[in-house]
Image (tube, rainbow, N blue to C red):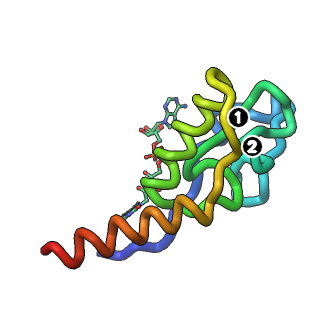
Amino acid sequence: MWAIGRHPVTQSLHLDQASVATAPSGKIVVNEFDQSNVSNIFAVGDCAEGIPELTPVAVQAGKFLADRLFAGSSKVSLSLLISNHEQTTNKHTKSS
Ligand SMILES: Cc1cc2nc3c(=O)[nH]c(=O)nc-3n(C[C@H](O)[C@H](O)[C@H](O)COP(=O)(O)OP(=O)(O)OC[C@H]3O[C@@H](n4cnc5c(N)ncnc54)[C@H](O)[C@@H]3O)c2cc1C
């Protein structure tokens, strides 16, 4: 199998019509709160610019965003997410 890279599927969303800023990669530009330049539009996971393309990161970012929007929580800590991911990976590697 040849893996030659990935790209976000954002073109069909017509983000330009909503004035949402994208990076040259097509990913959505977000701040540390996953918020785009349009205050009520957010992006998490692989389609967000500058975010590590990893499943646990996307899952946790989604949970944190839901918390922030609906329960009032803190911002995403990427270092914490990556640390948790490494701990989980090490745990599974050692136990197998
Ligand atoms: C080959 C490969 C191997 C990987 N291995 C790992 C790994 O070992 N560990 C790891 O942590 N990560 C791995 N990843 C990365 C991981 O898959 C992604 O980081 C993760 O899936 C991102 O989640 P997401 O929800 O942002 O995007 P996705 O999982 O891509 O989900 C996006 C969803 O949105 C849907 N969608 C798209 N456009 C629209 C639309 N207009 N309307 C409605 N729905 C839409 C898509 O169909 C899709 O279901 C790998 C990725 C690839 C490609």
Callout 1 amino acid: Phe
- Label 1, residues with CA under 10 Å away: few <14, some 14-19, many ≥20: some
Q: Residue at x 44, y 54 (%)?
A: 56
In this figure, which residue is indicated by the disc labeled 2? 33
Quadrant where the C terminus sits is bottom left
Secondary structure at badge 2 equals loop
**Residue 94, percent from left and from top:** 21, 78
Residue at the (34%, 65%) spot, across then down: 88
* Residue 78 rendering spot, x and y as whole percentages: 62, 60
The residue under the point 50% across, 68% down is 83
Q: Earlier in the sequence, mark 2 or mark 1?
A: 2
Q: Quadrant of residue 33?
A: top right
Could you tell me which secondary element the residue under label 1 belongs to? loop
52 to the left or right of 1: right
Q: Is residue 90 left or right of residue 43?
A: left
Q: Which mark is residue 42?
A: 1
Q: Give the quarter of the figure containing the N terminus.
A: bottom left
Q: Are marks 2 and 1 in contact (CB under 8 Å)?
A: yes
Question: Which sits in the foreground, 88 or 9?
Answer: 88
Let me know if residue 29 appears in the view: no
* Residue 46: x %, y % from top left: 56, 52
Q: Indicate which label's residue lies in the foreground, 2 or 1.
A: 2
Going by the picture, which residue comes out furthest to the left?
Answer: 96
Nearest the eye: 92 or 1: 92
Q: Is residue 92 left or right of residue 58?
A: left
Three-letter amino acid code of the residue under disc 2: Phe
Work out whether 66 lies above or below 84: above
Place of residue 48 in the rendered image (x, y in percent of width and height, measured from the top left): 66, 50
Q: Choose top left, top right, bottom left or bottom right for residue 72.
A: top right
Residue 22 appears in the picture as rendered: yes
| Distance between mark 2 and mark 1 Cα atoms | 8 Å
